[in-house]
Amino acid sequence: MASVCKTFSRGFSSSAIRQTTIKHLTVIGGGLMGSGIAQVAASTGHQVSMVDQSDDILNKSKANIGKSLQRVVKKKFADDPKGGEQFLSETMGRIETSTSAVACMEKTDLVIEAIVENLEIKQKLFSELDAAAPKHTIFTSNTSSIPIGDIASSTKRLDRFGGLHFFNPVPVMKLLEVIRIPATSDETFNKLLAFGKDMQKATVNCKDTPGFIVNRLLVPYMIEAVRMLERGDASPRDIDTAMKLGAGYPMGPFELSDYVGLDTMKFILDGWSKNYPENPLFRPSPMLDKLVGEGKLGAKSGEGFYSYKK
Ligand SMILES: C[C@H](O)CC(=O)SCCNC(=O)CCNC(=O)[C@H](O)C(C)(C)COP(=O)(O)OP(=O)(O)OC[C@H]1O[C@@H](n2cnc3c(N)ncnc32)[C@H](O)[C@@H]1OP(=O)(O)O
Ligand SMILES: NC(=O)c1ccc[n+]([C@@H]2O[C@H](COP(=O)([O-])OP(=O)(O)OC[C@H]3O[C@@H](n4cnc5c(N)ncnc54)[C@H](O)[C@@H]3O)[C@@H](O)[C@H]2O)c1
């Protein structure tokens, strides 16, 4: 495994749209979210190191970024194919990959962690990074449900720690939740808000509460749909059709659960039901547990509530 950052496409002179103090960021985790965050950061002029556990995974992440960029180019450069090509190669040229997050720390202004939704694994990662990163580097997590304060407690830079919660698919969804813990300094928080604007996202502020704003409302709704199915009230297809045509949602709750990943849904619910056992909205779901136990994780594994096998 390579342990240094390597560029996979030759860079061009930066055509940055705006730049604040964040010039270089390290995105850890090149899955659904990390690859989207790396893509948007690079396409808005930032230098990016994307880190994952193996070169195989990173190659898939790069391929996914390439495909997603093609969709962006098709829309934004419909009348300018040359400009589209240049945008694509410049964006790719700003992304390096590495299997060692520690090796990327020296030059980085901001870390965005987007690895598996597990507190112990996130804490272990951040305590290693804390020892390696320069003093000014800001640490953030893209966690869906784990308290930012619990993750930050593994470091000695609580004033330079916050949450940046993006939404899937990152290149399309316009929102960024910016979360501060009591120890986050105003300077750090303001830098995170400015970075969100640089990423061309609309930012909202939220305290470090379970699920922040969107997931605190969205996840109970999605799980309530699974409970309807468990009771045999209606089929996934009918529930999805009802919410799309009756409530104007772009995806029904089962399509969205498969899109988000059933493992991520389970991690969220398990954490919340453990921390808040008195809240009936956070009860585990036997059906969700069964699907995840069978490796049916949604679109990314080829099957969840629906089948995606070709
Ligand atoms: C759990 C977590 O912590 C928090 C979360 O993330 S919760 C999940 C939040 N996300 C959602 O709720 C997503 C809900 N779904 C949607 O908004 C839409 O179904 C969707 C944007 C995913 C797809 O839209 P849809 O119209 O069905 O399909 P499609 O036509 O393929 O895409 C719409 C546009 O987005 C673009 N697009 C979709 N996915 C893309 C991607 N990954 N990269 C780049 N562009 C993309 C398409 O190119 C298309 O552009 P166009 O309008 O110019 O043609
Ligand atoms: N899926 C969503 O819709 C969504 C939306 C917002 C936030 N999130 C959060 O973002 C994070 C990532 O979710 P995802 O859906 O992208 O997951 P994913 O499973 O698609 O990707 C996670 C990636 O992290 C890598 N990884 C795991 N441990 C690692 C480590 N120690 N070092 C480096 N890489 C490591 C894995 O190999 C994998 O490629 C989670 O905290 C999740 O809760 C998910």
Image (cartoon, rainbow, N blue to C red):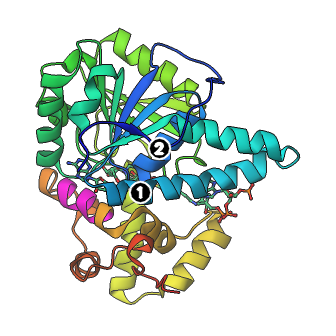
In this view, the residue in front, 106 or 231, is: 106
Residue 181 vs 60, above or below: the answer is above
Q: Is mark 2 within 8 Å of ligand 2?
A: no
Residue 198 drawn at (x, y percent): 57, 25
Residue 267 drawn at (x, y percent): 24, 60
In this view, the residue in front, 119 or 249, is: 119
Looking at the rendered structure, the kind of residue marked 1 is: Asn
Q: Residues within 10 Å of mark 1 (few under 14, many from 20)?
A: some
Judge whether residue 212 can be spotted in this image.
Answer: no
User: Any magenta on residue 12?
Assistant: no
Residue 265 vs 5, above or below: the answer is below
Left-right relation of 38 to 226: right
Residue 113: name its quadrant. Answer: top left
Left-right relation of 37 to 13: left
Gap in Å between the C-alphas at discs 1 and 2? 10 Å
Residue 11 vs 274, above or below: the answer is above
Residue highlighted by disc 1: 59
In this view, the residue in front, 179 or 292, is: 292
Q: Which residues are magenta?
A: 265-272
Left-right relation of 101 to 275: right
Looking at the rendered structure, the kind of residue marked 2 is: Phe
